[in-house]
Every structure is written in C-alpha cells, then in structure tokens.
Image: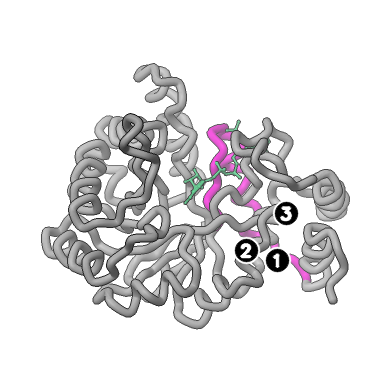
Amino acid sequence: MQTIRLGSGNLVSSRLAYGCWRIARSADAAADLATARRAVLAAIDAGYTLFDHADIYCDGRAETSFGAVLRETPSLRNNLLIATKCGIRFAAGSNTPYRYDLSAEHIIGSCDESLRRLGVETIDIYQLHRPDFLIDAEEVSRAFDELHRAGKVHEFGVSNFSPSQLALLQGAARWPLVVNQVEISLLQLSSLGDGTLDQCQAEKITPLAWSPLGGGLLADGPVDILAPQRAYQPAQIVALLDEMAQARGTSRMVLALAWLLRHPAGIVPIVGSTEPGRIAAAVEATQIELSRDEWYRLLTIARGVPLP
Ligand code: NAP
C-alpha cells in the first residue's frame, strides 16, 4: 500500500489505517481473540501498518486482544505502528460522572495500562482522545516529556480537538502534535469548514478520519451504534456512490474512502470493518484519484444543499 509521513514527525504509515474499536466486542476472551486475529492479520496482509486503539475500546479488551495477537507472532511488532488514546473516563457511581481527564496523573497512568494490555514497550502515537475542558496545557506538556523520556511514547497527537484547542496545547508542548483524529466522511463534513483541515494542512498535522464510512451507514452494512443520536439521511449519498461506483467498476465503500483520500491535507481514513474481505477490498481506494468534478458531485449531495 502507498505510505504517508504522519505530520512533521518521523513516522511513516500506510495510506489507510486500521481501527481496532470493534475487534473485541463479545466479552468472551477466546471469541475476541479469534475476531482480533482474523481482522488484524487480514489488515497486515493487505498492507496496513498503522493500528488505532484507545484505552476504552471494548473496555480495554481491544488492546488486550491485539496484544495477544502480537504475542503469538512477536515479529509482527517490528513493522507496525501502534496508536492509542487516553482521556475519556467512564462513570463509576453517582459521584463519579462520565468525564474527560487530561491530568498528568491520568495520562501517565493510562499509558502504563495500555502498554501492559498491548504487551509492548512503546506506543508509537499517543493521542488525547477528547479535549478536557479543564486542560492545563503546561501540565499535559510535562506528562508528554515524562512519557517520552521514559521511552514509553514516540510521538503525540490529539483527537476531536478544535483548531483553537490544538493551538493551545501545541503552544505549550515541546513535541509536535502529529495527528488530529476527527470524524470525517460524506456524513460528517464539519472539518472541511471549521478550520480543522486548514490547520492540518498549514501546520503539517495529519488528519486521521474516524468512522470514514459513517460507522457502516455508507457501506452495505449494519447501522452504526451511534445512529440513533444522528440526524442524517444517507440514502441519496449512497445512491450517487453506487452510480459512480458502477461507472468506475468499483464499490461504494471504495469510493467513499477515495473521496477522503483526495483531500490535499492528506487524510488517513481509519478503516473499521472486522471482515477480512472488506479490510482488503478497501485498499483499492488508494489506487483511485477522483476528479474534481466527481469530488464536488459527492460533496454537493452530502451537503444536501447547493454550494453558495
Ligand atoms: P467505519 O469504517 O465507518 O465503520 C465500520 C463499520 O461499518 C463496521 O461495523 C463494519 O461492519 C461496517 N462496514 C464497513 N464496510 C462495510 C461493507 N462494505 N459492508 C457492510 N458493512 C461494512 O469505521 P468505524 O469502525 O466506525 O471507525 C473506525 C475507527 O475509527 C475505529 O476502529 C477507531 O479506531 C476510530 N474511532 C475513533 C473515534 C474517536 O473519537 N477518536 C471514534 C470512533 C471511531 P463489519 O465489521 O461487519 O465489516
């Protein structure tokens, strides 16, 4: 697969990343390991080198299952980049609400837990999952220094940060933030207009696109678990994707990913299917360059209203 340098750092990733959010959902360790093994090995075979995690994915079982796959074949680690995240904390009783926590204590403790579950010595990209409203940028910066000094993290990034939140942190941090992982797809266009992709392009930060298929709504698959909270209606987008896919002899999924890859900010879509055939088929998107006309036709249908 083609590769891309991540931000202004030293890491080079496959043009598509693989997302591990869904690889361990059963809560049965053997079944989770089987799903993770199938998905992760399929992704490696297809040329994916960047694997995205979070401490909270499947309550830690995504990292644990991935770690078990690596233990079965330790040499796999040499050619992979592991990204994970911290900062979202679940509720624990009526006095402890669901919250964001980017205190140094939580960042460092959560990193240690992720390293233990993954069974590795270093995380390649450590991302702050969501912007903590109580963030102290200097404190986060000190936590980054400590993690880097201890050899626990190579590079740092953020997720779901607005341009001003990213600028605040980057102003204090001694390490360049190499990625901002945000939701981008034909069903979620905000980053095109809210300054996120402009900032990425201007400051050499790689945008990682989460739920690039809208969690399945843009594919043929099951409705995404967040769907009840969402208002969008993908039928017209899907119809145009199908029409264009037929003309190009490809699939709806591939075109939805190719639409992201066409953006000059160098968006890296994080593919989330657990099906080996789909994981492999998605790679075709890296061989397609949409024309400006094709890209704008899809943008227009996705906006739902004509451009001004
Ligand atoms: P996605 O690729 O938009 O959706 C994956 C879902 O779509 C799966 O349920 C998959 O089912 C289904 N699907 C995909 N292709 C299909 C096809 N051709 N036909 C039928 N069904 C299809 O991505 P996602 O899983 O929502 O998110 C990707 C990654 O983004 C996650 O793993 C995680 O790493 C990251 N993420 C980050 C955040 C954040 O806040 N930073 C939030 C959400 C996700 P099958 O498994 O059955 O194929």
Badge 1 element: loop
Q: What is the three-letter code of the residue carrying label 3?
A: Leu
The answer to whether residue 67 is left or right of residue 290 is left
The answer to whether residue 88 is left or right of residue 282 is left
Return the x and y of residue 123 as percentages of the image width and height.
26, 53
Disc 3: which residue: 255
User: CB atoms at circles 2 and 1 under 8 Å apart?
Assistant: yes
Q: Is residue 53 part of the magenta span, yes or no?
A: no
Q: Earlier in the sequence, mark 2 or mark 1?
A: 2
Label 2 to label 1: alpha-carbon separation:
8 Å
Badge 3 element: helix
Disc 1: which residue: 289
Disc 2: which residue: 261
* Residue 84 at least partly seen: no
Label 3 to label 1: alpha-carbon separation:
9 Å
Residue at the image position 20 percent from the left and 39 percent from the top:
116
Task: Say how the picture is coloured.
Answer: one colour
Residue at the image position 63 percent from the left and 36 percent from the top:
224
Residue at the image position 28 percent from the left and 46 percent from the top:
77
Label 2 vs label 1, nearer the camera: 2
The answer to which image quadrant residue 11 occupies is: bottom left
Q: Is ligand 1 less than 8 Å from the beta carbon at label 2?
A: no
Q: Nearer the viewer, residue 68 or 130?
A: 130
